[in-house]
Image (cartoon, rainbow, N blue to C red):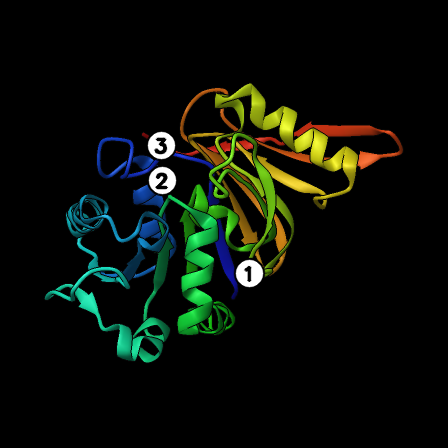
Amino acid sequence: MQRILAIGGGGFITEDSPSPIDRHIANLTGKARPRICYLATPSGDLPAHLDKFHAAYGSMGCETSHLAFFRQPDSRSILASDFRPRLLEQDAIYVGCGNTRSALAVWREWGLDTALREAWEGGVLLVGMSAGAMCWFEAGLTDSFWGSARRPLACLGLLPGGCAVHYSSDPKRRETLHAAQQAGTIQPSIAIDDFAAAMYLGTSLDRVLSWRTGSTAYQTYREGDVVIETALPAEQISQ
């Protein structure tokens, strides 16, 4: 079963750790002691993010590891020289937040993009928050170009269409996504709020999860000269 969980914002990086979505991810593996590897490439393998991941998921009884391209390996690391077989034996792979464009460039240079697709096809649960959510789609609406505006970015293409994150926390995200769809520069998209996540089975949206009242995801697309935005019903997960 091919599964991807795209988180608009939240989880162990920004909430008390672990948050409801972190507990849900561990449960999704169906394992008593799931093996979960963290990719912090979008943040440049920020040590604080690595430490938060190991603390949050370790406290839930997970067997944690991380793959870092910008830091020297430690006892918790998967080696960059031999990551493929280790990633394929994971129950879940979690991609963190940061700069999507830079992460994709690093992954393509190292061949990690190919390994991630292979892991997904082999049934490893893929998870990501913010940059780590957008990376799985054909395109993400990102500020990774370090300009004043958000722009569409070609991503890994495991999932069809575009993705926007942190959607309701900043009105400019909605404005920018709608403008991009009016201009035809991004595909029909899913836009995900903070404290919400979209679960995909294969390449189809299965359900939206929420752990804060009012948070959800939206389907957006252009029809003629009008952008249509539809709020999706969300399944509440326990605190």
Quadrant in the picture for the C terminus: top left
Task: Check disc 3 and report the residue beneath it.
Answer: 238
Q: Earlier in the sequence, mark 1 or mark 3?
A: 1
Which of label 1 and label 3 is nearer to you? 1
| Local SS, label 1 | loop
| Local SS, label 3 | loop
Apparent side of residue 161 relative to residue 92 in the rendered image (left or right): right
Local packing at callout 1 (Cα closer than 10 Å; few below 14, some 14-19, many 20+) is many
Q: Nearer the viewer, residue 167 or 3?
A: 167
Task: Check disc 1 and report the residue beneath it.
Answer: 156
| Local SS, label 2 | helix
Task: Check disc 2 and report the residue beneath it.
Answer: 21
Q: Earlier in the sequence, mark 2 or mark 3?
A: 2
Quadrant of res 33: bottom left
Which of label 2 and label 3 is nearer to you? 2
Q: Nearer the viewer, residue 125 or 150?
A: 150
Residue 221 appears anywhere in the view: no
Residue 117 appears anywhere in the view: yes
Residue at horizontal 87 percent and vertical 29 percent from the top: 225
Q: Position of residue 189 (x, y in %)?
A: 66, 41
Local packing at callout 3 (Cα closer than 10 Å; few below 14, some 14-19, many 20+) is few
Q: Which mark is residue 186?
A: none
Apparent side of residue 205 relative to residue 215 in the rendered image (left or right): right
Q: CA distance from mark 1 to mark 3?
A: 31 Å
Amino acid type of the residue tagged 3 in the rendering: Ser
Q: Position of residue 150 (x, y in %)?
A: 56, 35
Amino acid type of the residue tagged 2 in the rendering: Ile
Q: Nearer the viewer, residue 237 or 67?
A: 67
